[in-house]
Amino acid sequence: MYCPFCRNPDSRVVDSRMADDGSAIRRRRQCPECGRRFTTVETTSLSVIKRSGVGEPFSRIKIINGVRKACQGRPVTEDDLAMLAQEVEENIRSSGAAEIDAHEVGLAILGPLQKLDEVAYLRFASVYQAFESLEDFESAIALLRHEAESVAAENAAKSAKGKSSEKSPI
């Protein structure tokens, strides 16, 4: 690591801390030559392999821009989009792979987007999964309804169980 002040090729690490929810390490360094301190941030590289075979660095901005189009006119804020992009990146990084197909990135977006806004999810899925007919939309909507009914039934069962376990003190 070159000193940014005197260009000395050596430096000493004074302090290391986790940054950005553990996805980076912030190091405070000191140059043995000039004595000045500077900060570096180390992150692991994550490459997205496109259909053409070309690799490019993972970008939260591209996730946000892609999802923003699907969320147009929906009650979704920029903060919501940033949180979605962070969740997608964390999910992808947790796989431990240094390279990931662009298709896998799209699949990683679908889950968090469905939780954020179902209409935006349908819009994104219709383009991403290349819906070709009304039947494709109908089956996606049926699946969403089935999942919503399952969650509602599960919550009702938990609620009923909680009420039955509450016994009166008499």
Image (cartoon, rainbow, N blue to C red):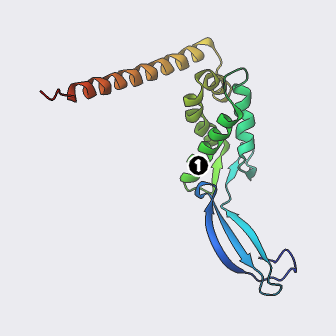
Of the 4 image quadrants, the one containing the N terminus is bottom right
Residue 150, located in which quarter of the rendered image?
top left
Q: Residue at x 63, y 14 (%)?
A: 133
Q: Which residue is mark 1?
A: 90
Q: Position of residue 85 (x, y in %)?
A: 65, 41
In the image, taking residue 64 as reference, residue 140 lies left or right, namely left
Q: Position of residue 39 (x, y in %)?
A: 74, 69
- Which of the two residues, 89 or 83, is positioned nearer the viewer here? 83
Q: Residue at x 73, y 52 (%)?
A: 57
Q: Residue furthest left?
A: 170
Q: Is residue 61 visible?
A: yes
Of the 4 image quadrants, the one containing the C terminus is top left
- Which of the two residues, 168 or 112, is positioned nearer the viewer here? 168
- Which of the two residues, 85 or 45, is positioned nearer the viewer here? 85
Q: Mark 1 is on which residue type?
A: Glu
Q: Against 61, is 153 above or below? A: above
Q: Position of residue 64 (x, y in %)?
A: 71, 37
Q: Against 159, is 66 above or below? A: below
Could you tell me which secondary element the residue under label 1 belongs to?
helix
- Which of the two residues, 139 or 21, is positioned nearer the viewer here? 21
